[in-house]
Image (cartoon, grey):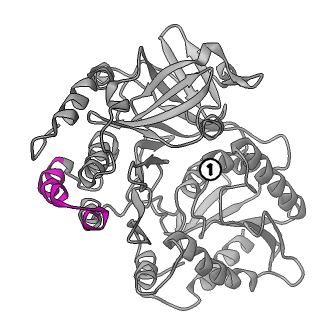
């Protein structure tokens, strides 16, 4: 670690004691030898109210910079980067439910895998004999310089898209760390962090916190209209986060879609996240604005989304074609995306692969979509996207593009495919970053540029135009009616 000023003696001891943790890194070089485990190999971490003995231990996940301590007493979690290590104040039940619900072992190659669900992302872990001293050292981790180091070293170690976004973390850190070292409090550190993240234009890489009793967020995005809305948001006094405020704007835009539906045909589910109806010419309409269920864990949300889609497709089964509108889908869970996409699968197909950028031992984990055993729609589908199609909305687009009866129309998507890896900082701030590489079935990545449509329709033009979304939707509906 390159320190701009001498570290306190206790911190120097802490960094030296972190060797047990940092020593994991050299093992990461070399060929990808760790394949994903089959879903059938994953077992619940908890049985009869306790963590099973086979899953207990200290497990570092190099591609994600996380460490899990699983014992008979429960679960605890740490983040680590560049010799730093700090505990996460999450409850044991939350960790077990949201992150470490399942585990699996492999003897050859030797591997230990953690996953939030059997279908979810597999985290390949390295076992440690003891908790590194850096994780428990009695130092003040809430200092501004520690916060800067925690964020900057995490980005340097784990951020996956440096080339695509023209980033040089070493240069940024060298330029900004002396200023961070002079910061006396979080309020003085905040502009330094804004400069550290300047120009990323990655909605998954962001910093959230509070200074002087006021909340803040440092976050960027792509797209002319997205940026216009951010500017409007920044010019107004408000208590909401930007993406929460954006939901109000989306609700106003959605009125334009409702106006296209034939009278009396509009239906909805999941508090309006799923809307369907009929358009002129025997065309069905289906909109999904979030890849999420109605709360609960991944399995519960997946089931809720599946029930909503079954109801919609039952109503629309006699239509000649379908306009599937995800122009305002800001994301959610990839597994919910997969549940929905299965209703449109003609046969099992590879949608994409993903792997952590920082752990070269790990082979890409494939996501395949097989036909659902319930309702299915195999007639022509026009999938409407825009710059507001983000994250799990984009992985859904990857899934749907593999089916021969689906055509992507509209505008390119946002270009943020990686999950947002959350880091909870010791000073109370929260940080997230993109650490995974997604590639389509042909091996191509669309990060930082988005998925281009097969057929263009101007949903949100560079020059703002009132009711442009409604006009684009009418145009796509006409294309569908002519099939």
Q: Is residue 171 left or right of residue 276?
A: left
Q: Does residue 356 show up?
A: no
Residue 454 or 128: which is nearer the viewer?
Answer: 128
Please state the extent of the stretch shown in magenta in the rendering: 170-189
Please report the residue visible at 21 percent of the width from the left and 49 percent of the height from the top.
169
Where residue 456 appears, x then y in whole percent?
51, 71
Where residue 389 appears, x then y in whole percent?
54, 64
Q: Secondary structure at mark 1?
A: loop
Please report the residue visible at 33 percent of the width from the left and 35 percent of the height from the top.
138
Residue 369 or 31: which is nearer the viewer?
Answer: 31
Q: Does residue 399 show up?
A: yes
Residue 456 or 451: which is nearer the viewer?
Answer: 451
Q: Is residue 179 above or below residue 48?
A: below
Q: Is residue 175 above or below residue 423?
A: below
Please report the residue visible at 45 percent of the width from the left and 43 percent of the height from the top.
439
Question: Is 417 inside the magenta-drawn segment?
Answer: no
Q: Is residue 318 left or right of residue 293?
A: right
Q: Is residue 398 left or right of residue 258?
A: left
The residue at which mark 1 appears reads as: 333
Where residue 69 appears, x then y in whole percent?
51, 26
Q: Residue furthest top?
A: 107
């Amino acid at each position: 670690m390159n320190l701009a000023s001498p570290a306190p003696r206790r911190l120097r001891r802490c960094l030296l004691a972190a060797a047990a943790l940092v020593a994991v890194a050299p093992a990461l070089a070399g060929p990808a030898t760790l394949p994903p485990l089959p879903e059938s190999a994953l077992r619940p971490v908890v049985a009869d109210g306790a963590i099973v003995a086979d899953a207990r231990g200290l497990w570092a996940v190099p591609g994600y910079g996380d460490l899990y301590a699983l014992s008979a007493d429960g679960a605890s979690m740490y983040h680590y980067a560049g010799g730093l290590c700090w505990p996460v104040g999450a409850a044991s039940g939350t960790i077990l439910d949201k992150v470490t619900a399942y585990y699996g072992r492999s003897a050859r190659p030797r591997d230990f895998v953690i996953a939030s669900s059997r279908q979810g992302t597999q985290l390949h872990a390295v076992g440690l004999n003891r908790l590194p001293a850096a994780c428990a050292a009695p130092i003040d981790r809430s200092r501004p310089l520690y916060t800067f180091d925690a964020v900057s070293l995490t980005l340097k170690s784990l951020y996956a898209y440096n080339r695509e976004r023209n980033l040089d973390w070493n240069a940024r850190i060298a330029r900004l760390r002396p200023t961070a070292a002079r910061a006396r409090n979080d309020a003085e550190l905040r502009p330094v962090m804004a400069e550290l993240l300047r120009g990323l234009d990655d909605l998954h890489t962001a910093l959230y916190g509070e200074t002087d009793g006021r909340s803040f967020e440092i976050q960027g995005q792509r797209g002319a209209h997205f940026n216009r809305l951010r500017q409007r948001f920044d010019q107004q006094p408000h208590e909401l986060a930007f993406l929460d405020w954006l939901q109000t704007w989306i609700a106003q835009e959605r009125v334009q879609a409702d106006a296209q539906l034939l009278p009396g045909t509009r239906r909805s589910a999941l508090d309006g996240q799923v809307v369907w109806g009929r358009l002129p010419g025997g065309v069905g309409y289906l909109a999904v604005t979030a890849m999420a269920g109605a709360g609960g864990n991944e399995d519960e949300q997946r089931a809720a989304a599946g029930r909503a889609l079954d109801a919609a497709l039952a109503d629309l089964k006699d239509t000649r074609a379908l306009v599937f509108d995800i122009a305002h889908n800001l994301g959610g869970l990839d597994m919910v995306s997969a549940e929905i996409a299965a209703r449109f699968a003609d046969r099992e197909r590879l949608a994409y692969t993903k792997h952590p950028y920082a752990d070269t031992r790990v082979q890409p984990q494939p996501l395949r979509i097989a036909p659902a055993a319930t309702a299915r729609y195999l007639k022509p589908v026009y999938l409407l996207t825009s710059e507001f199609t983000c994250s799990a909305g984009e992985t859904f687009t990857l899934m749907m593009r593999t089916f021969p009866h689906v055509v992507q129309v509209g505008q390119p998507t946002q270009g943020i495919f990686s999950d947002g890896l959350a880091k909870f900082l010791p000073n109370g701030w929260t940080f997230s970053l993109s650490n995974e590489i997604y590639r389509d079935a042909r091996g191509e990545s669309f990060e930082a540029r988005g998925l281009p449509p097969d057929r263009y329709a101007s949903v949100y033009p560079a020059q703002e135009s009132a009711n442009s979304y409604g006009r684009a939707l009418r145009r796509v509906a006409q294309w569908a009616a002519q099939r």
